Image: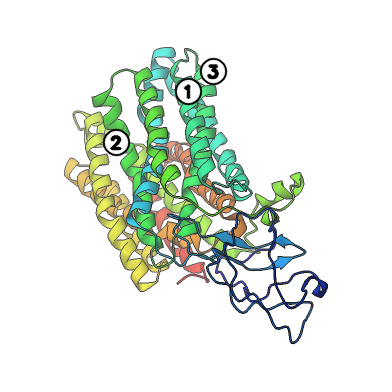
Amino acid sequence: MTSAPAPDGAGRADRGAHSVGSAAEVADAAVTVPEVADAAVTVPEVADAAVTVPEVADPAVAVPKVADAAVTVGAVTAGAVTDAAVADPGSGLPAGTAVLHEPTVPVTAAWTTSLSLATLAVFMAFMTPIQILLPLQLEHIDPHDKNAALSLVTGLGALVAVLANPLAGAWSDRTTSRFGRRRPWILGGALAGAAGLVVTAVQHTVAGVALGWCLAQAGLNAMLAGVATPVADRVPLTQRAQVSGWTGLMQSVGLVLGALITTLLVTGVRSGYVTLAVLTVVLALPFVLRHAEPPLPRALRPAFDARAFARSLWVSPRRHPDFGWAWLTRFLINLGNALGTLYLFYFLADAVHFGDPGTGVLVLTLVYTVCAALTAVPVGVLSDRVGRRKGFVVLCSLVMAAAALLLALFHTWPSALLAAAVLGAGYGIYLAVDQALVTQVLPEAADRAKDLGVINIANSGPQVLAPALAAPVIAHLGGYTGLYVVAALVILVGGVLVTRIRGVA
């Protein structure tokens, strides 16, 4: 991985030295700061600027007091700022906190709410077309091959997601806009994703739908890169699981809310897409407009090199084993969850013999979401309070595996309701604690969004793999009983592997 030298994620940078290039630049023992290039900083007043220089080493000048200064400059070499951050009203960062340092100032409830709304927008725009709008649209376009068409469209969209998320994250890490690194990508991704949804809405061929959906996926994954990273950028460890619980919960809420909007509040496929497009932008605006963030100084942005940039998208598990184990844990638990929820419609129809499997799936999804909401935030608060993550991930794997075994052993409607409640409770624990854990194993503070994009492949990858894995299991390894036993085993393996992480309690 290539990045400019910067303080690591734990924020242990030495802020004590201020190198000014040459001792000749210090005249009459007075320090003057006429200009700091490429840094969004203002020094309104420097008091007691007279400096006694008993000894100049390498050459270093000690400034004993800077009064009313809105910024702490960690190191200045040859007139270039290499580590600076601005105290921006509403940013949650005090004067002197470097942009790449580990955050220490608690975020407000308003900040968490705004970020959660932006996250809700992403997942509502992701999930609702896959679950409802695309199947209806493709059934109208090609009723005879609708299943193959849906697989083609969603598969191409998943491929775009796998590529777009880390790429957008890497560019976000390099963004030096005065509006910060994340907000331009959140707003730009929301607008591009909304445009892709509108393009998809007006298509009348499978190829056109595929193109529109790929455009939407590219924009929405750029937005996802923006909304996923502020937790690592701005939230201290003492709040991280709690905030992750709220933002993670938006995945399930987005699915339910999107389904209700597109089935009850609006009618028609085209109006459903347009409604989602409008909501995607509207829900992103509170975070973008109300919560400033410090800009990245240009001197901290590494020079672009195409080969080095491509190599940086691979995070070596040998060099960063904790990151590798966290990625594999997330992949396996998400794969098990996908196996447990993918075929619920057919499970209710073929094994439970439920009269209206469509309504049954909606009821199970609501139960799942409510139970996830009941555990995500309280467990997040508890995890932050005790300062531990791995034990909660192990707990969530045990709870989710128990739910899968319920589906494997009992093919009745009451057992399906119980399994949905247990699975949701387990996944709520996972949503809060795993995201907090992942932010603690990121290799470089300067590459947070890119590395989280790599981690997010462990979310989208299982959605592609699960159908290919589930079909032969159902056909040759015991039907739905075999499917849910496999799901339980995959989840348990994920819970065991999290214990291999050494740098997080």
Residue 363 at x, y = what percent?
Answer: 22, 38
Residue 43 at x, y = what percent?
Answer: 59, 62
Find disc 3 in the rendering and name its residue. 207
The residue at 50%/13% (across/down) is 205
Find disc 1 in the rendering and name its residue. 148
Q: Nearer the viewer, residue 505 or 115?
A: 115
Please count the marks in the image: 3
Q: Is residue 401 placed above or below 15 in the rendered structure? A: above
Check residue 257 in the rendering and tell me which mark sits there, or answer none: 2
On the question of residue 99 being in view, the answer is: no
- Going by the numbered disc 2, the residue's amino acid type is Leu
* Quarter that holds the N terminus: bottom right
Residue 9 at x, y = what percent?
Answer: 56, 65
Lower position in the chain sequence, tag 3 or tag 2? 3
* Helix, strand or loop for disc 3: helix
Q: Label 3, label 2: how many angstroms apart (C-alpha)?
A: 28 Å
- Going by the numbered disc 1, the residue's amino acid type is Ala
Which mark is in front, 3 or 2?
A: 2
Which mark is in front, 3 or 1?
A: 3
Lower position in the chain sequence, tag 3 or tag 1? 1
- Going by the numbered disc 3, the residue's amino acid type is Ala
* Helix, strand or loop for disc 1: helix
Residue 352 at x, y = what percent?
Answer: 22, 37
